[in-house]
Amino acid sequence: MKIYIYRLTNFIQIIITKNMGFFIALGIFRMLSFKWKLSLEIIEILIRYIVPIVIAYTTGNLIEKKYGAMSSVLASTIFLVKYDSGSILIIILLSAISSNVVKIVKEKVILKYFPSLEMLGLNLLIPFITVISGFLFIDMSETLDGYLQRIFIFFLEFKENIWFIFLITPIIEISKVFFFNNLINHGILFFLGYEEMIEKGSSIFFLLETNPGPGLGVLLAYFLLKKEKKGIMNSIILEFIGGIHEFYFPYIVKNLKLIFSIVIGAFFSNLIFYFFNVTLYSLPSPGSIITILLFSKKKVFFLILGIFLSTLISFVISYFILKGTKESKISDEGDKIKKIERIDKIGIVCIGGVGTSSIVKNYLLNELKKQNLPLKVENYSLLELENDVDVVLTHKNLIDQVRSLYPNKLIITLENYLDREFYKKFIEKYIKNNEIVKKDKITILVEPNQKKLSQLANNKKEEILFNNGIGLIDRDENRNKIEIRHYPYGINYKGKELFLLVSLYLNKETKEKVKNILRNLDETIIKELEIIDTKDEIIKILNLEKILDLEV
């Protein structure tokens, strides 16, 4: 149950994160509206149509890449025209229903029974499915929107009570420390702030989680008391200027007494924001002092006062806590590293796939570059890790979520994102000790988007072996070459559906390795063969780079 809730909240967070530019644009137009009246018309169009449509597109695309976005946009358009509501949560729900229906019809009916008619079938069915789901949802929407509005009204009214600050502050600050910051910010506070922004033009909800003051105070206390200044200074810059709060979380996890400092510091700043009605025009993402000041609604003095006070209080409390206790040492993750056959690609995973993972990626790439090791390194959100990743790097507080999502991946944890020694040790023990002797170049010829079956076996010894929609031809001659023909709509051959026909002109050892790769492809990868259309995508999804040095 826990993992399903986490996947749902992470799914919503990804939708909001991918479209953050639109919400920031809304804030900018709000600021311009005082001097440029045309901004009000632009805001109305954005809120009424543009934002819901891009949310629908993103939701559908995440569920079913090829047709999900199309079905979601069509269903949402019907809903928006018929029903006067731009509720983002309702649009996400409608889009999820519509795109899932299309996905089920595509996989369980069309591809199973009419594979050669995929384009015709879906092009005819999608309008019918979306029209039906759009109109059916209109009947449900009034009741659903009513419940949502009651929830929003409850929190917006409760916000006017001083007890709201007492209740919400510790929840936000403690959740942040355990890496639920994006869930709290993008999954809850954002929707409350968006509703209030539509009604009043700005909201305090945009400020409660993004305030960099409490974390900055903790880092300043560490900087003053600890010998290792450079790493802490980098964290200070990234926290205050860069707006990536995750960099102070590990310091608090090492000494949980510091939770008191951030909660009390945030409490006093939130009281100032509450009493002096300090609000922001949009969600500052990332939560940098620059974006916060940019979206502030006139009362800049009280905004700065609140941030300064939270920093000062957090610093003082943290200073005395750190001076009187010993912190636990960062664990030596290098000792946990195990060898695997070969590493070609490393995936850095954080919750959103944007902030901390991109910083870790840059740190690791710099160390790899210094040692002339040309490995691929990419950063991902929790739900978007690609199949060709060999090793996953993530924070130790996220290990349970990552392991439950990717049980077959080798996962290495780190505790301090800015610990350069970890990256050096990781490369030394994990990369260098797994170097593989270079192989002969293998040429791969790919012919995507084919419609007619050809290249069949030439003699009796060369028979076609079928496995999960892939046909293999074991050619006699060794020319260090692989030929791949791609049939995105499927071809019926001897009663079996064929998406790829692969001819292997290789030596026996390499041939067996390629066969093993193709035999072990899971069902989700086979489905992706339907939507890819370039040779680079085909080679990547088949994961052939893992054992071959390719010349494409």
Image (tube, grey):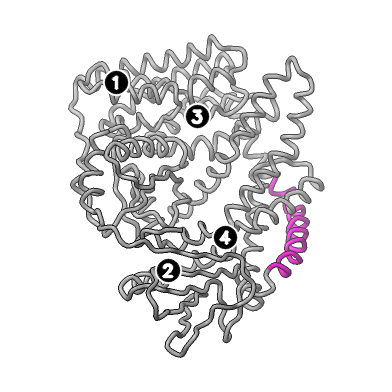
Looking at the image, tell me whether mark 3 or mark 1 is earlier in sequence order. Answer: 3
- For residue 532, the mark is 4
Kindly report the distance in space between the C-alpha atoms of the residues bearing marks 4 and 2: 22 Å
Is residue 29 found left or right of 471 in the rendered image?
A: right
Residue 286: give its label: 3
* Mark 3 element type: loop
In the image, which is nearer the foreground, mark 4 or mark 3? 4
Which one is nearer the viewer's eye here, 323 or 153? 323
Which residue is at a point 39% across and 71% down the rendered structure image?
479
Question: Counting other residues with Cα less than 10 Å from the Cα at mark 4, is it few (<14), some (14-19), or many (20 or more)?
Answer: some
Task: Say which label, 2 or 1, has the lower sequence index.
Answer: 1
Quadrant containing the N terminus in the rendered view? bottom left
> Where 52 falls versus 531 (above or below)?
above
Magenta residue span: 119-146
Amino acid residing under circle 1: Ser
Sequence-wise first label, 4 or 2: 2
Within the magenta stretch, is there residue 128?
Answer: yes
Q: Is residue 251 above or below residue 487?
A: above
Of the image marks 3 and 2, the number of the one nearer the N terminus: 3
Where is residue 179? Give x, y as percent.
Answer: 40, 38
Q: Estimate the spatial distance between the alpha carbons at disc 3 and disc 2, rounded to whole Å.
A: 48 Å
Q: Residues within 10 Å of mark 2 (few under 14, many from 20)?
A: some
* Left/right of residue 444 with respect to residue 372 in the rendered view: right
Q: Would residue 396 be found to the left or right of residue 383 on screen?
A: left
Residue matched to label 2: 481
Badge 1 crowding class, 10 Å Cα cut-off, few under 14, some 14 to 19, many 20 or more, is many
Q: Element under label 4?
A: loop
